[in-house]
Image (cartoon, rainbow, N blue to C red):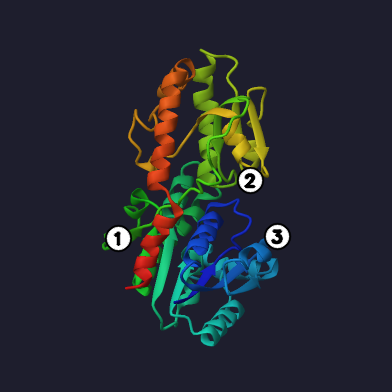
Amino acid sequence: MRLFIILPRVPYPTEKGDKLRAFYQIKQLAKKHEIILCALNDGDLHEDAIPVLKKFVKAIHIIPISKVSIAFNLLRSLFSKKPLQVCYFYNASSAAKIHNLIRDYKPDHLICQLIRVAEYAKGIDIPKTLDYQDVFSKGIERRIAGAPFYLKPFLKIEYHRLLNYEHDVFERFDNKIIISEPDRELIPHPDRNKIVVVANGVDTAFFRPMEHEKHYDLLFTGNMGYPPNIESAEYLVNQILPEISAQNPGIRLLIAGASPHLRVLVLKSEQVTVTGWVSDIRDSYASARILLAFKALNARAGIELLVSQTPQEYASHIMFLLNNPDKANEIAQNGYDFVRRNFNWETETDKLENLLNH
């Protein structure tokens, strides 16, 4: 099958979640299908991006979107009902290029990653799949409460536009996928249960247990320019760390990940290290004793991870793990086995492939 995949970003390097997901899905789909990759690009293209991606795709088309074009699109969005998230990535000239490519390649199926590029699928009369991946409306809603007063009106407008768009775009695609069940439940459409959950995976050949001297007690990692991660880092440093420090003044936290926001950078202290981009994130994992994880994993509490709801509970669980290394190692091994069973790129991408074949 010939697949035409439209992405809002070039999926290399994989320092952001959407790029990571696209890269590994492409890598898996390329084993059985011919892939035409079309990626928008609003920044500098990494020198290794095309050589790396050419290993998996038949053709790559990078469509640059200039800062001038973006500014014009955002200005035009003031008079539109479409979300800024969509207007930022859409313009007529890019749409014409994409439609011409689809006409020339005659693909069997079109895949759009994120609602950001869903407009480019309009008028394309072939089977189509949308990867919602994230629920942008919920992300904006969470930001409203803590936003400065002058931003609140704009965020509220964007929130309602996203709600409407996430609902309306549902009908334009034959198939819909998303990362997790909790995210699926937030999609504002009565038939949301028809969205297939296709989780992210972990490259367990690359990420495996490593012997390493422990320089840190805690690790929090991710794209540190992403608002939920910024808020999580602040909560961790401002609410949880003081609770732990009262019992263990020498506690050390590592915050590792690309594009740290100023709000993250100012969290640095003798106890807190903020690295920014690291060339090999495995070193960060291996140098810390405890990883702070994500609730949507659906792992078993007390067996594969520990679950906390308050700063006090976090402090209690962290101190328990630090003081009981045998139990910590047991949970770590159970967690590793859980990831291998449930977050495998091959088996998760098979779920997407099954949709393409029906």
Sequence order check, earlier mark of 3 and 2: 3
| Quadrant holding the N terminus | bottom left
Tell me which amino acid carries mark 2. Answer: Ala
Q: Quadrant of residue 306?
A: top left
Residue identified by numbered label 3? 46
What x and y, as percent, mark residue 338? 39, 40
Position of 114 compared to 10: left or right? left
Residue identified by numbered label 1? 192
Q: In which quarter of the image is residue 238?
A: top right
Position of 164 compared to 100: left or right? left
Helix, strand or loop at mark 1: helix
Sequence order check, earlier mark of 1 and 2: 1
Q: How crowded is mark 3: few (under 14 residues within 10 Å), some or many (20 or more)?
A: few
Q: In the rendered view, would you say 153 is above or below 252?
A: below
Q: In the rendered view, would you say 254 is above or below 47?
A: above
| Number of the front mark, 3 or 2 | 3
Helix, strand or loop at mark 3: loop
Q: Distance between the residues labelled 3 and 2?
A: 15 Å
Pick whichever, 169 or 194, lies toward us. Answer: 194
Residue identified by numbered label 2? 258
CB-based contact (under 8 Å), mark 3 and mark 2: no
